[in-house]
């Protein structure tokens, strides 16, 4: 087994637990929509997916959704409602910082610009990685094979010397298909056990 050189972290529900229900509740209060109406809107429209791959700007997303849902607040209020859904997993963040001295560390995330601006401002240590691949910047989303190939090519990552950590099975399986070693994040202790098996942590 070749030694590990690189750890790649997902953001949402790995380093940053989040709850869309918080934004949904506040949007219902500000628009008069029911929860079902709001959910049906985002299922039936492509706007959030387009935002995630950079086909819509944050401003275009705001103008479109605010118009459709009769949201009368400002862009700043809208972005804050959509983004103030995150907390930090202190144990995972501390682990990522501990690994800094021995491994290259990267972030690979399906995300939107409002979220990145919000979490980078609230949790500035998330900036302190060796690189970030963000879906809206590169026009690709996990589990598309191309996004894994992109991060490896851009940062010179050797797949069998890297570990990818993500909470979604489909994303983990897609990473493994490219040759990356991958761990499905379920909780901190299980992740530590898996990293120990791979020689990253010692018992």
Image (spheres, helix red, strand yellow):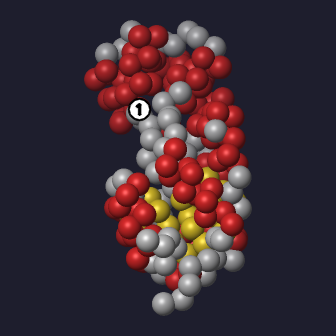
Asked which quadrant contains residue 3, the reply is bottom right
Give 134 or 2, whichever is nearer the viewer: 2
Query: As displayed, is residue 82 above or below residue 184?
Result: above
Q: Residue at x 41, y 25 (%)?
A: 22
Q: Residue at x 66, y 63 (%)?
A: 100
Give 203 or 200, whichever is nearer the viewer: 203
Is there any visible trace of residue 152 in the rendered image? no
Judge left or right: residue 129 versus residue 39: right
The outermost residue toward the bottom is 1
Asked which quadrant contains residue 57, the reply is top right
Q: How many labels does the image show?
A: 1
Q: Which residue is drawn at 69% across and 34% down?
A: 121
Give 68 or 118, whichever is nearer the viewer: 118
Residue indicated by mark 1 = 20
Is there any visible trace of residue 93 in the rendered image? yes
- x and y, in percent, of residue 128 in the image: 71, 52
Query: As displayed, is residue 42 above or below residue 55?
Result: above
- x and y, in percent, of residue 60 in the image: 63, 30
Query: As displayed, is residue 78 above or below residue 158?
Result: above
Mark 1 Cα-neighbour bin, 10 Å: few <14, some 14–19, many ≥20: few
Classify mark 1: helix, strand or loop. helix
Judge left or right: residue 92 versus residue 128: left
- x and y, in percent, of residue 35 in the image: 31, 21
Query: As displayed, is residue 57 above or below residue 54?
Result: above
- x and y, in percent, of residue 97 in the image: 62, 56
The outermost residue toward the left is 36
Q: Is the C terminus in the top left, top right, bottom left or bottom right quadrant?
A: bottom left
Q: Residue at x 58, y 11 (%)?
A: 73
Judge left or right: residue 116 versus residue 24: right
């Amino acid at each position: 087994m070749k030694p590990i050189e690189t750890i790649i972290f997902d953001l949402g529900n790995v380093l940053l637990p989040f709850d869309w229900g918080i934004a949904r509740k506040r949007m219902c209060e500000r628009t008069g929509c029911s929860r079902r109406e709001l959910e049906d809107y985002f299922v039936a429209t492509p706007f959030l997916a387009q935002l995630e791959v950079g086909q819509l700007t944050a401003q275009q997303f705001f103008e479109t959704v605010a118009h459709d849902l009769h949201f009368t607040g400002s862009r700043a209020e809208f972005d804050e409602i959509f983004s103030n859904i995150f907390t930090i997993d202190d144990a995972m963040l501390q682990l990522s910082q501990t690994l800094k001295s021995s491994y290259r560390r990267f972030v690979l995330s399906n995300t939107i610009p409002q979220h990145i601006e919000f979490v980078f401002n609230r949790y500035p240590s998330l900036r302190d990685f060796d690189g970030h691949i963000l879906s809206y910047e590169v026009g690709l989303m996990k589990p598309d094979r191309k996004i894994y190939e992109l991060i490896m090519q851009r940062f010179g990552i050797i797949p069998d010397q890297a570990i990818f950590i993500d909470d979604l099975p489909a994303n983990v399986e897609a990473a493994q298909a490219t040759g990356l070693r991958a761990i499905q994040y379920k909780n901190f202790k299980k992740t530590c056990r898996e990293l120990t098996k791979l020689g990253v942590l010692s018992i």
